Amino acid sequence: MARKYKNPLVTVINPKSPAAESYRGLRTNIQFSVHDKQVRVIMVGSAQMNEGKTTTVSNLAVAYAHEGKNVLLIEADLRKPSLHHVFGVSNDTGLTNVLAQQVDVEDVIRPTAVTNLSVIPSGSIPYNPSEMLGSHNMQMLVHDLKQRYDMILFDTPPILAVSDALIVSALCDGVVLVVLGGKVKKSQVRKAKTQLEHVKAHLLGVVLNNITIRENEAEQLYYGSKWLK
């Protein structure tokens, strides 16, 4: 039986709130961001720590699950994992243990309290996270999981801190970049974008956090105004 959340998710505890609606809007924007292929494997990353990428990827995963898709959320931050705290699941074994061929993937897929949503936690902290994420075993694992799930989402370490996120981006159909407005320098965001482009990652779009929108601006945002173009 799935455990209760230690950290509530707005898409779960208040699904009719404007914040929850914004995650559904993000889901829709991703679906319409490309026309020539399906986007089924998504990485959510950020330039620096504490920009809200784990919150974003968790709520986005819930939004996809609420749509009826069979969703798998994978913790690819093998250095400071947090998804197991968000969903209240065990992290005794996880992705690293599968990649090290210590356990089968079925042994580490954790059900959550959200119908259609499962999580693979990071597992044991390895000494070589970048090498594990870039391994042939990782490529084969993602290939196999794509046969079983409609959507696969990855949480990752900060892009500018280590190479892990860039490695994971190569396995994905697209990347969502989370930016904490007013806190992160534009130069850092540009550098993260450049690094993603260098590895030929497909940047789907940017989620801007920590922004207050006044009522009249919200109406313009809803109907679409020239200043957004």
Image (cartoon, rainbow, N blue to C red):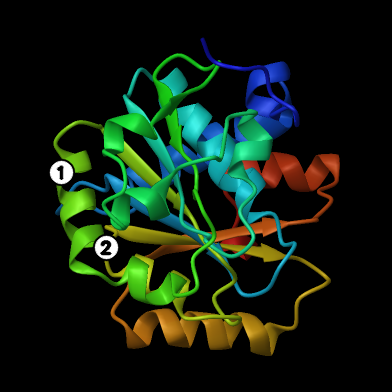
Q: Is mark 2 on a helix, strand or loop?
A: loop
Q: Is mark 1 on a helix, strand or loop?
A: helix
In x, y percent, where is residue 6? 75, 28
Q: Which of 99 and 30 is in front in this view?
A: 99
**Label 2 neighbourhood size at 10 Å, few (<14), some (14-19), many (20+)?**
some
Quarter of the figure with residue 68: top left
N-term-proximal mark, 2 vs 1: 1
Quarter of the figure with residue 180: bottom right
| Residue 16 visible in the shown view | no
* Residue highlighted by disc 2: 171
**Label 1 neighbourhood size at 10 Å, few (<14), some (14-19), many (20+)?**
few
Q: Which residue is drawn at 34% across and 60% down?
A: 174
Q: Which residue is drawn at 64% across and 20% down?
A: 12
Of labels 2 and 1, the one closer to you = 1
Q: Which of 112 and 193 is in front in this view?
A: 112
| Left/right of residue 54 with respect to residue 146 in the rendered view | right
Three-letter amino acid code at the position of disc 1: Asp
Q: Which of 105 and 177 is in front in this view?
A: 105
**What is the CA distance from the residue labelled 2 to the residue labelled 1?**
12 Å
Three-letter amino acid code at the position of disc 2: Leu
* Residue highlighted by disc 1: 144
